[in-house]
């Protein structure tokens, strides 16, 4: 009994003994769990923040409606408003254009010089047919801009015929002036008039059919502004090409020009006139301005006065157009150097877009040229009279593809541009990059002989690069659209052939997290 009792006591003692962990250990476990939850939450928040701020997830800034678009240019007033109205849909489908650019609709003499300020050329239509055209265009998301000559009138105008002499620029000593016409530097800009017994100014030759108007006469200035306001308010044009804006004023003492001093262009009054015109339009409209004399200009003040700087435009949208840097043809234009001069000009440093245009009728050259232009900032102008009938359906299809990329992909709209000219082949390469997006590059042979070279891609997997668009038509070529090519090997291109490729960059930044 004693033994049994002893066993029972031992069992009871064992049952009442506390085997739970000490309180400090419990607290440590709770703290560790909280720390773990905190770290996991912080890591999750960090991932969300990284995704939110990563460029691929950021919405690109809005760009003007005309940027990276196609302007269909009607450089001569040959098509009636009603006829153009009927063809709008076909033009949009064929050219994927966003804008119709009309030549002047004013009554003209010699196809160049205005007879009046506020009338419509009756051979084109009337107020109603013009309004119908603009309305139909807007219904189809097409903009309409028009040439607006500012510098001169025709000597057949009622102002000149009625002897309204104060309306124009006269100089009794014109025979001693060295001012020459713009389009013929061997032709004097002054012509003697027997009735007035004086010389009148015509900076544009035009077979002596034009006469410069006198903007220093307030009545002339007011007439011009009123006529501009008339067209802007009564017709819903989306913009104007201000022809001759930089020639409107000239030195009032008619002093001779020197190699370094121009007396007829870029005067302070020209900028004041432009500022006055800006007040007549809203910011959604576009002004096309005279091109600057040379892309190599280093006159920052001159560019800023006309176009604004890279921080913003001055009172509206402006778009520069090319002057002597237009593509003339394959014989007179070194196209590679044209792009080189542009890329090293102050225009690209100031982020100033261009309206690129061509005078060539070589459709293969024009296709390659316009494809390259769409990789730069600006828009392209296809002249319906010079190039409209030259392009094949395949060429138009490729240009439509490139235009779609340029308008919709952020890497084109807001990406960075890197242009190179390969020293051996003179291949032109233009690359568009944006962090978080695939790189895009165009490779073009603008020489007149077949060339071969190796293009070094500095980022990403380069032995399996996608061909996006190409005009290489040889059957069985390795450069077919959607093919994967090895860019560590050389590329061979015939004259005016091009490749557009894209590839994924190396994973960096956020990619390290994953």
Image (cartoon, rainbow, N blue to C red):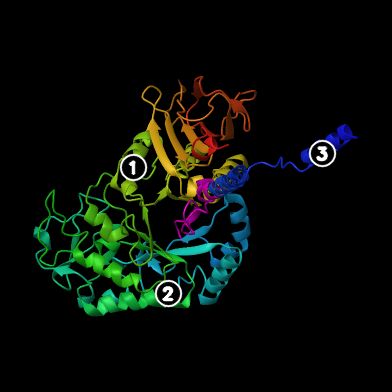
Residue 35 position within the rendered picture, expressed as x and y whole percent measured from the top left: 56, 46
Along the viewing direction, whichever of 273 and 183 lies nearer the viewer:
273
Along the viewing direction, whichever of 493 and 166 lies nearer the viewer:
493
Question: In which quadrant of the rendered view does residue 317 lie?
Answer: bottom left
> Does dot 1 land on a helix, a strand or a loop?
helix
| 474 is higher (above) or lower (below) than 125 | above
| 158 is higher (above) or lower (below) than 23 | below
Contact flag, marks 3 and 2 (Cβ < 8 Å): no
Residue situated furthest top in the rendering? 489
Specify which label sits upstream in the sequence, 3 or 2: 3
Along the viewing direction, whichever of 183 and 283 lies nearer the viewer:
283
Task: Return the mark for residue 231.
Answer: 2
Say how many tags the image has: 3
Along the viewing direction, whichever of 505 and 211 lies nearer the viewer:
505
Give me the C-alpha separation between circle 1 and circle 3: 103 Å
- Note whether residue 204 is visible: no
Side (left or right) of 460 relative to 338: right
Q: Residue at x 51, y 37 (%)?
A: 439
> Does dot 2 land on a helix, a strand or a loop?
helix
Residue with the mark numbered 1: 342
Residue with the mark numbered 3: 9
């Amino acid at each position: 009994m004693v033994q049994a009792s002893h066993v029972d006591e031992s069992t009871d003692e064992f049952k009442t003994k506390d085997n739970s962990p000490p309180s400090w250990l419990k607290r440590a476990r709770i703290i560790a769990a909280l720390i773990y939850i905190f770290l996991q939450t912080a890591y999750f928040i960090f991932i969300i923040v990284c995704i939110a701020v990563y460029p691929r997830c950021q919405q690109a800034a809005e760009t003007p409606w005309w940027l990276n678009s196609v302007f269909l240019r009607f450089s001569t007033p040959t098509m009636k408003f009603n006829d153009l109205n009927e063809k709008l849909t076909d033009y949009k489908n064929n050219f994927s254009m966003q804008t119709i650019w009309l030549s002047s609709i004013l009554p003209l003499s010699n196809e160049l010089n205005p007879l009046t300020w506020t009338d419509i050329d009756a051979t084109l239509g009337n107020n109603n047919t013009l309004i119908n055209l603009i309305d139909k265009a807007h219904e189809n998301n097409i903009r309409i801009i028009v040439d607006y000559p500012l510098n001169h009138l025709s000597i057949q105008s009622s102002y000149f015929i009625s002897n309204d002499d104060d309306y124009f620029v006269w100089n009794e000593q014109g025979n001693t002036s060295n001012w020459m016409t713009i389009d013929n530097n061997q032709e004097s800009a002054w012509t003697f008039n027997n009735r007035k017994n004086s010389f009148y100014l015509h900076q544009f030759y035009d077979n002596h059919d034009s006469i410069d108007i006198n903007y220093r006469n307030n009545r002339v200035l007011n007439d011009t502004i009123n006529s501009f306001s008339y067209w802007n308010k009564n017709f819903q044009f989306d913009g104007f090409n201000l022809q001759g804006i930089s020639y409107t004023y000239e030195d009032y003492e008619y002093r001779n020009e020197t190699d370094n001093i121009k007396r007829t262009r870029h005067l302070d009054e020209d900028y004041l006139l432009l500022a006055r015109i800006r007040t007549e339009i809203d910011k959604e409209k576009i002004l096309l301005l005279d091109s600057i004399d040379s892309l190599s200009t280093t006159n920052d003040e001159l560019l800023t006065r006309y176009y604004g700087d890279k921080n913003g435009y001055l009172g509206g949208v402006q778009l520069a157009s090319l002057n002597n840097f237009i593509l003339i043809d394959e014989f007179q234009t070194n196209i590679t150097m044209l792009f080189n001069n542009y890329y090293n000009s102050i225009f690209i440093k100031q982020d100033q877009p261009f309206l690129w245009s061509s005078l060539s009728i070589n459709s293969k050259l024009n296709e390659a040229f316009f494809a390259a232009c769409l990789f730069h900032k600006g828009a392209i102008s296809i002249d319906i009279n010079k190039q409209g009938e030259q392009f094949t359906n395949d060429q138009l299809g490729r240009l439509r593809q490139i235009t779609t990329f340029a308008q919709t992909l952020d890497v084109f709209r807001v990406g960075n541009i890197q242009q190179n000219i390969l020293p051996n082949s003179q291949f032109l390469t233009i690359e568009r990059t944006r962090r978080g997006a695939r790189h895009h590059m165009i490779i073009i042979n603008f020489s007149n002989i077949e060339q071969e070279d190796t293009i070094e891609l500095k980022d990403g997997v380069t032995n399996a690069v996608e061909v996006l668009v190409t005009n290489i038509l040889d059957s069985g070529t390795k450069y077919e659209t959607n093919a994967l090519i090895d860019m560590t090997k050389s590329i061979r291109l015939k004259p005016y052939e091009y490749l557009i490729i894209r590839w994924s960059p190396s994973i960096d930044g956020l990619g390290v997290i994953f």
